[in-house]
Image: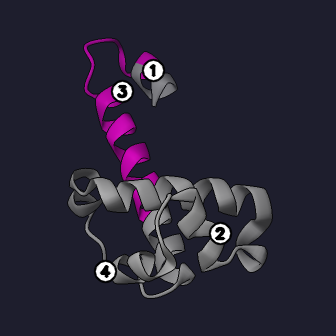
Amino acid sequence: MIESEDIATDPKRARILEGALKVFLAYGFARTTMDDIARAADMSRPALYLQFKNKTDIYRAIALMLLSRSLEQAKTALAGEEPFAERTMRA
């Protein structure tokens, strides 16, 4: 399983996930191929397979990345000095 720290600190994996997210949004999970993801990440398919074993793993990593981002945004919003109601609206 991919840890959120790995996503944030490994530029190659981040490039793959950002490219894959665009491809999944454009074509959907079923129509997206590892070739599509490799092209979007500007790398070869064998290089992609060194990072992820299949597109399901990439999809899971994207979900983790997006959840981690959302959690960080919520933590930041809720940590403010404003009244609770205003902080929850920002979260």
Pointers 4 and 3 in contact (CB under 8 A)? Answer: no
Q: Which amino acid does label 4 sit on?
A: Met
Residue 61 drawn in magenta: no
State the mark number for residue 77.
3
* Amino acid type of the residue tagged 3 in the rendering: Ala
Task: Tell me how far mark 1 sits from mark 2, CA to CA.
Answer: 44 Å
Q: Which residue is drawn at 62% across and 75% down?
A: 35
Mark closest to the chain's N terminus, 3 or 1: 3
Q: Is mark 1 on a helix, strand or loop?
A: helix
Pointer 2: residues within 10 angstroms few (<14), some, or many (20+)? some
Where does label 2 land, which residue?
Answer: 36
Q: What residue type is labelled 1?
A: Ala
**Residue situated furthest front in the rendering:** 44
Q: How many angstroms separate mark 3 from mark 1 (CA)?
A: 11 Å
Q: At x 46% / y 65%, what residue is drawn?
A: 43
Q: In this view, does 47 lie to the left or right of 7?
A: right
Q: What element does badge 4 sit on?
A: loop
Q: What residue type is labelled 2?
A: Asp
Residue tagged 4: 1
Label 1: how many Cα within 10 Å (few below 14, some 14–19, many 20+): few
Q: Nearer the viewer, mark 3 or mark 1?
A: 3
* Residue 20 position in % (x across, y down): 57, 62
Left/right placement of residue 66 relative to residue 12 reads: right
- Distance in Å between CA atoms under marks 4 and 1: 36 Å
- Judging by the rendered image, the residue that carries numbered circle 1 is 85
Whole-percent x, y for residue 41 in the image: 50, 59
Colour scheme: one colour
Badge 3 element: helix
The answer to which of marks 1 and 2 sits earlier in the sequence is: 2
The answer to whether 11 is drawn above or below residue 37 in the figure is above
N-term mark: 2 or 4: 4
